[in-house]
Image: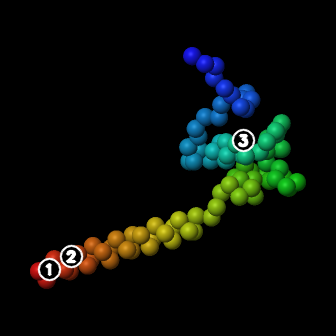
């Protein structure tokens, strides 16, 4: 067997954190995006602006988007399904 090639240096691993974990989840996002921080304050500092929470820093970096588009899409999908099922029911009663 050949040697395994590694192209990047790694100190450790970042484990999965579910989105419902709050600030821990946002910290994990920032650890993947911010290079070389040495403190929590440096992780929360985006473009020389100190943010109070990791979540605010994620928004400042553009890691989190507003969910209005998702809500609108899910609403239009559910309304479309209701129209299709109503059409099928009406058509079935006329046959």
Q: Residue at horizontal 16%, vertical 77%?
A: 92
The picture places residue 2, in percent across and down from the top left corner, at 61, 19
The picture places residue 11, in percent across and down from the top left corner, at 73, 27
> If the image is split into quadrants, where does the N terminus sit?
top right
Q: List the single residue furthest toward the bottom.
A: 94
Q: Residue at horizontal 72%, vertical 41%?
A: 31
Q: Residue at horizontal 67%, vertical 46%?
A: 29
User: Does the image show residue 56?
Assistant: no
The picture places residue 5, in percent across and down from the top left corner, at 66, 26
The picture places residue 35, in percent across and down from the top left corner, at 79, 42
Image quarter of residue 13: top right
- SS category of the residue bearing label 1: helix
Q: Callout 2 environment at 10 Å: few (<14), some (14 to 19), or many (20+)?
A: few
Q: Earlier in the sequence, mark 2 or mark 3?
A: 3
Q: CA distance from mark 2 to mark 3?
A: 52 Å
Image quarter of residue 3: top right
Give yes or no for contact between labels 2 and 1 (Cβ–Cβ under 8 Å).
Answer: yes
Q: Earlier in the sequence, mark 3 or mark 1?
A: 3
Give yes or no for contact between labels 3 and 1 (Cβ–Cβ under 8 Å).
Answer: no
Which of these two is toward me, 34 or 41?
Answer: 34
Judged left or right of residue 30, residue 16 is: left
Q: Identify residue for label 3.
A: 31
Q: Residue at horizontal 82%, vertical 39%?
A: 37
Q: Identify residue for label 2.
A: 89
Image quarter of residue 94: bottom left
Q: Identify residue for label 1.
A: 93
């Amino acid at each position: 067997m050949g040697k395994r090639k590694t192209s990047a240096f790694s100190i450790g691993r970042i484990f999965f954190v579910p989105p419902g974990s709050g600030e821990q989840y946002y910290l994990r996002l920032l650890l993947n995006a911010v290079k070389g921080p040495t403190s929590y304050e440096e992780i929360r500092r985006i473009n020389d602006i100190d943010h109070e929470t990791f979540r605010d820093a994620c928004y400042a970096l553009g890691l989190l988007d507003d969910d209005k588009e998702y809500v609108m899409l899910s609403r239009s999908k559910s309304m479309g399904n209701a129209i299709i099922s109503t059409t099928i029911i009406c058509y079935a009663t006329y046959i």
